[in-house]
Structure formats: structure tokens, C-alpha cells
Image (spheres, grey):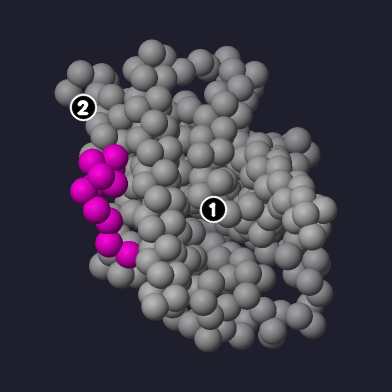
Amino acid sequence: MQRNAGGETAEAGTNVLRGIGLMCVALVLFSALDGTAKYIATRSGLPVSQVTWLRFMSQFVLVVLTFGVLAVPHLLYSRKWMHQMVRSFLMLGSTMFNFMALKTLRLDQTLTIGFLAPFIVALLAGPFLGEWIRWRRMLAIIVGFCGILVVVRPGYASFEVGMIFAALGTLCYAVFMLLTRYLTRFDPPEVTIFYSMLAGVFVMAPFAIAEWIWPADAFTWALLLSTGLWGGLGHYIFILAYRHAPASTLAPFIYFGLITHTALGYLVFGQLPDGWTIAGAMIVIASGVYLVHREHVTATERRKAEEETAKS
């Protein structure tokens, strides 16, 4: 029995390491998506509507080829299709605002502002999902917001409209995450992934066509089409990571994205984060890790209380 227990423990440890590895791979792909979008936005002169539409369209084609055309009716069947469509529009808003922010901000700046999403999720989980937070986590949220203020430095640093776009994208993504958590109770992951592309494919099509500018060369075409690969594959691997390791274990590794974004920003654009961004990011990361810790403690206390109730 002890040997079996040890084998199960070793297998669980292997799964956790696999989940962490998959999470890191997903974050590298997300960095590639943002880096590619920034390169296109700043050096190709193509409109955001066209870049956004091609990002979703290329992923749509990739998903259809992966699952097969005959699987599309099955992928469209949802028990909560209206919620899925709202989530799809939020995905579109998050992507478009992020691409607009990348025109003027560094990769590390947009990502650090994006780190605010888990804090917004924690705040909104109460009224949306009934998952109310206590004072310790509320304090962590306030500290995390202060970290974002260190990055933005309102009234002291030169104003960049990209910061507003980054904040709007973060808000869209936070509500998107809440709906994702809600929809896991009703629909399988492949249905949710398929729906997430629909608004970007069909709603953005007329805007992209109206503002269409033909890419200058094959390299620009390759970059445009690769955005669907980075985004689609990244989200798929992201989901796989959560199948191998619990959310509380993986959550702190999301901040690995700051390293990948910073490295790509330096290698491609010659940009490094300034001292304010580094300081603000460290505050946000510290408060985010503490927030995850408190969620783990709360879940453990709830589980123990349920076990005691069951015994009695």
C-alpha cells in the first residue's frame, strides 16, 4: 500500500510539473502573439480592424481544420449560447483594445496593466458568482491597484492613450474570465473555444474589408496569419495546463509572462522596462501571489469544515 501511495504521489508530482511546463509554453505563445501584433501595428501601417479580423479568422480556419467541418454543428451546440456570445464579444474587445495599446506602449507595460485582471475577477466574483472576498484579499487588491498606479504614474508621467486601451482590454478580459469560469459548468472546452472566435470573425469582417490595406509582402502576410496560431495554440495549451495541475498551483506562474514579454521586447524592439514599471510589476506580483495564497487557505478551510460536517 505504501508503494502504491508513493507511486500516486510521484505521478501527481509529475502531472503538476507537466502543468507548470504547459503554462510556461502557453505564456511564450501569448508573448509571441503580442510581439507579432505590436510589430504589425507599428511597422506595417495596417489598420487594427484588419489585424484583429485576420487574427480571429486564421484561428477559426485552424480550429475547423483540426476538428473537421462536420464537427461545426456540434461545436455550435451550447446550453448557454447567449452567455457564449457575450463572452465572444468580450474576447473581441480584449484583443482589439490590446492591439491598440501595443501601438504606443511597450510589451511589458501592457502586460503589467493586464495583471490587474485577476484582481478585477476577485472583486466581481461576488456579485457575479457569489464568491465573496474577505478583508485580507480586498487589501491585496488595493495594493495591486497601487502597483498599477506606480506603472502609470498619473499626473507625473507623460500621458499615453495606450494606457486607457490597455485598461479597457483588461476589464474586458476580466469579465471574459468570469464567464469562462461560469460556462465550465455547462459546456465542454472545445465549444467555448469555438464560440470565442465568432464575434471576431463575423462582426469585424465588414470593418476589416472597409479599411482593407493589402500587406506589402509575404513576410507581413505570414505575420498576420501566425497570430491565429499563437492565440489558438496558446489558449489550447493553457487549458491543458489546468488539466494537469490545480489553479492555485499554476496562478503564480502567470507572472512568468513578464519575463517572456520583456525578453521579446528587447530582442525585437530594443525596449527594456524602466524602473517604475519594474517596481509596479513587483508590487502587483507580490499582491497577486498573496491573493492566490488566501484563496488556497479559504478553500482548505471550507473543505475541512465540510469534512467535519459530514463526520458529524
Residue, far left: 155
First in residue order: circle 1 vs circle 2: 2
Q: Position of residue 279 (x, y in %)?
A: 36, 19
| Distance between the alpha carbons at the discs numbered 1 and 2 | 33 Å
Q: Which residue is mark 1?
A: 247
Quadrant position of the C terminus in the picture: bottom left
- Magenta region, residue range: 131-141
Q: Position of residue 156 (x, y in %)?
A: 20, 18
Left or right of 121? Residue 205 is: right
Q: Which residue is mark 2?
A: 154
> How many numbered discs?
2
Give the SS element for disc 1.
Answer: helix
Give the SS element for disc 2.
Answer: loop
Pointer 1: residues within 10 angstroms few (<14), some, or many (20+)?
A: some
Give the vertical position of 82 relative to 268 (above or below). below
Q: Which amino acid, mark 1?
A: Ala
Foreground residue, 277 or 92? 277
Quadrant position of the N terminus in the picture: bottom right
Q: Indicate whether residue 134 is drawn in magenta.
A: yes
Give the vertical position of 105 relative to 81 (above or below). above
Foreground residue, 11 or 312? 312
Left or right of 34? Residue 75 is: right
Left or right of 76? Residue 63 is: right
* Disc sitting over residue 35 in the figure: none
The part of the image, by quadrant, that contains residue 176 is bottom left
Q: Residue at x 52, y 30 (%)?
A: 258
Foreground residue, 251 or 214? 251
Q: Main secondary structure of the magenta part?
A: helix
